[in-house]
Amino acid sequence: MFYRETGQFKTSYGADQQIFPIRQDRIGIVLLLAVAFVGVPALGSEYFFSAILIPFLIFSLAALGLNILTGYAGQLSLGSAAFMAVGAYAAYNFQVRVEGMPVLVSFVLAGLTAAGVGILFGLPSLRIKGFYLAVATLAAQFFIVWCLTKFPYLSNDSSSGVISVPGVSILGFDFDTPRSKYLLVLTLVTLLALAAKNMVRSTTGRAWMAVRDMDVAAEVIGIRLMHTKLLAFAVSSFYCGVAGALYAFCYLGSVEPDGFSLDMSFRILFMIIVGGVGSILGSFLGAAFILLLPIFLDIVLPALSELLHLPFDGATVSHIQLMVFGALIMFFLVVEPHGLARLWQIAKEKLRLWPFPH
Amino acid sequence: MIKKSKQFIVAAAVSAACLAGAFGPAQAAEEQYFMLPSYRVGPYGANGAAWYGGFIDYLSYVNMKGGIDGVQIAWDECETEYNNAKGVECYERLKAKAKAAPGPIHVMSTGISYALVDKTAADKLPLAMMGYGLTMAVDGSVFPWAFPLVTTYQMQASAIIKFLKDKNAGSLAGKKIVYLYHDSAYGKEPILALEAESRLNKFELVQIPVAHPGNEQGAQWQRIRQEKPDYVIMWGWGVMNMTALKTAQKMGFPREKMIGSWWAGSEEDVVPAGDAAKGYMSATWNVSGKGVPLIADIEKTVYGGGKGNLSDKSKLGTILYNRGVSAAVLSVESIRAAQAKYGKGKAMNPEQVRWGMENLNLDDARLKALGATGLLPEVKTSCDNHEGSGKVKLQQWDGSKWVVLSDWLEGNKALIHPLFQADAKKYAKEKGITPRDCAAEAKKK
Amino acid sequence: MAFFFEVLIGGLLSGIMYSLVALGFVLIFKASGVFNFAQGAMVYFAALAVVGFIDKGVPLWASVILAFIVMTLFGIATEKFVLRKMVNQPPIALFMATIGLAFFVEGLAPLLFGNDVRPLDIGLVDEPIPAILDSLNIVVSRFDLTAAGLAALLVIVLALFFQYTRVGRALRAVADDHQAALSIGIPLQHIWALVWAVAGFVALVAGMLWGARNGVQFALTFTALKALPVLILGGFTSVPGAIVGGLIIGASEKLAEIYIPPLMQSVFSGNFGGIEGWFPYVMALLFLLVRPEGLFGEKHIDRV
């Protein structure tokens, strides 16, 4: 009833090939963007912008990057945080060392730098597969963080290795409030997400999926494995790199190499698994879930234990939070291994008929 | 289905109530609110539990004694797991509530404090980093809102050198000292200071980093064995400390020649190492034990009244517990200093608290009145010195408790403070901050 | 030269400690094709259980037995509530589930047994063996040597178990193909519960040795990071591979930590120590380029 594509006839190739072929999707996306660009800035509080929405968008972008690599091209990676670190430090260096460098150009260059490093660490994927590759990407994780700690040049000779980024200003406009930073991040993430959506349904995206499903078969039908895999690493690292630059410039302000830890890489991986491997939407849903759940538990559990007069102290509540978090991940995998994005798909199927039975 | 939806409604109502609590209007007028982004789980959970236990116990103690001249203290904890992003989220969540009448913010994590330095400056909230964090914030002209109170890594390193120098009849010339450090911002901060000391005192400095987390140090200690240093100065954190002690034992290096930083000198670091820790020394800016009248009184008043925060009472009087108490003492005393200027018995706003922290004068007389003589050094802050002391004591582990070896030792301020100022100047330039004129401000007063 | 051998021997012995942790991974991977990320958390859980019981006044030997029972129950529960429901899921989903499991255990273990850092005294003093120290001036740790002996014993027992017992054969059948094993009547669920219990036992041994070495605390979960390169080097499915991999990783990592930073220092200026974090991974990576299935891994043939 609410989601029926019957009666929507495509009369041209353009109409058939557009990015959102179904009218309801188009309306939905426009509404969503309207809410995100107009509604949220008008209503949201500072806390929402700086502690929830900005990190949500940044991690969505990183998850999107990882999803391109893992979900579409089938190469498991545990080094996403390191590529974010490359992005953050590269953007910082371009900003500090090149006089008058526009911030957006720095972000793009940071992405490209990360892409270059990504290609380098993607090379082993030509030989190694599966979990062996995943553990190999850990090499990238540890090596990159070590380099950032060890070469003082990369942190502009800061004695502690910590960088503190300059303010963001584009064409004379200072992005110094949480709201303006949110809008900047939102714009970039929207553009990159649309680009990704387009990419995965192009020749490139189909080649990635062919490689993911079976690389030998893909090679047999004429897909160049090296080119395809390395491109996936490059694009994925580009997204992570931009996310890292945004993480430093629009979220934390000061970052240290150790902040981009293995823990963070795992967090990004959880996002795509919970959200849905091989789904653009899933990256966003997963990021929301992984970021918001601990905050939600942090707020609810102490209140709940007080309400029920349970004799919990602070440490116990923290431990229970961790357990609930772990249990929910397992629960999701048991109930819906294809992630939240799959739930959304099921909902759409239901909506097609609902409320009429046939 | 009905049952399920009921559960959902309950859950939604609970969460709505909590959200309302988190974002609700400011509390009653005369209350000072502390946000505590604490950690009790994760790799450093044991340390956090003791530190924040001490901190909260002192706040309860002050409340039970009638508050800060009648102003009661309120606080909320928020679990950070020692994770930077989570720490920032906690800060942002509790910030609105703290806007009216905050206490100094303590995060007890170098990483989180880095992330908060800019944010607190923008939000105009006072950030305290007691013995951790961004050390160049000693220069208050560039960092009006950040306070690395009591002492910094650099001053500590310098004080340790001073201790060794005194031990060696005033000269370290020709000696060899190994600096074994956690390979992170924390371990790297003192290097410049140690290099400066090494040039000044003509000892040889060998730097050996340990990769995080530091649970395997065979190679490092083999190298130390080969170098045959006179002393090893160790900047460890968490598991690295006991591993170092155990490996030193394994390699036959005498622990009497090992000196740790104050994050490598708590019961949590030496007890698990067992006999391997005997004779090991560390710096500290607060003493342990219940011998201090204040700690004994907290035990009597707070735990006697059933309001204690520690679930494991054996932590009472440990180094980290007492450090938490000391940090709380300094915070409360800053608010008292502010009240003395802006009106007794009133809740102080952020600017007033900041003034209090910048004009803190905790002298021996005041420490005595608090029952905290010897617990922590005298602290006197000013616009150009947010550190206020720079003194540490040296202590030695005798197998069951820490024995204090020295009086308060001050680092070489003339050598170290210019390093902070140079760093702060560079920072100000990168960030486009115009430093305050401390001299002019001092004259105005 | 004595110094070189000292580093080499120290490295080999440390390597055995890594192997112990890696063994747990291998067991579960071999039997169920699950890359069990929670192995590090299990090491922590087991060690914490031992000191937790000791704190309650139970003697050491009884604590170890009780801890083993806890680990067995944990293995059975994992099988019943998680793995059984995920049969025939792709390996990545199972891998993810074990990450969730790791979080769960990291919350559960300190909740049950306390969060404090505690010593674990198993009666081994970690001091250099005087005879070797005096004659060759090489430090060989008594503790590490004993640990290596224990590890060797454990591996022999496990190898025999896999090779010659009915259960061992069933385990190998399950590892090859879940469905085929099920169809010929091997009780998959029992086998999985059993293998998780065995992995729990290995975690217990590893946890006790690491705990006695560095103190029982959360950082025991990080031992998993030391085991991963061992695992890729030795192959995910090989018990001897875990041992040989551990020896190689341990020795090369220590030698590298001693000899590479000075080399780098002479090229760039600065201090380049602390390479132990990444060196084993890079080495394993380079090794994989030559042999993608690890040292003793089963060769995988792709068919279209």
Image (tube, coloured by chain):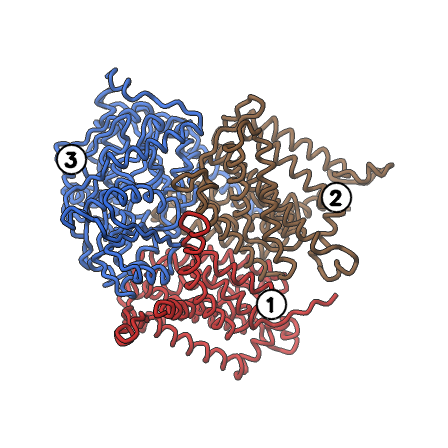
Chain colours: A brown, B blue, C red
Q: Position of residue B75 (x, y in %)?
A: 33, 35
When the figure is inspected, residue C100 is found, relative to residue B23, above or below; the finding is below
Image quarter hosting the N terminus of chain A: top right
**Distance between mark 3 and mark 1 Cα atoms:** 68 Å
Q: Secondary structure at mark 1?
A: loop
Q: Residues within 10 Å of mark 2 (few under 14, many from 20)?
A: some
Residue nearer the viewer, C57 or A273: A273
> Which of B68 and C221 lies nearest the eye of the viewer?
C221
Left or right of B306 in this view: A199: right
Which mark, by number, is residue B367?
Answer: 3
The residue tagged 2 is A353
Q: CA distance from mark 2 to mark 3?
A: 75 Å
Protein chain holding label 3: B
**Can you identify the residue that label 1 sits on?**
C291
Looking at the image, residue B180 lies above or below residue A105: below
- Badge 1: how crowded within 10 Å, few (<14), some, or many (20+)? some
Q: Do tags 2 and 3 sit on the same chain?
A: no
- What amino acid is labelled 1 in the image? Arg
Q: CA distance from mark 2 to mark 1?
A: 54 Å
Q: Amino acid at mark 2?
A: Leu
Residue at figure coordinates x 24%, y 41% from the top left: B325
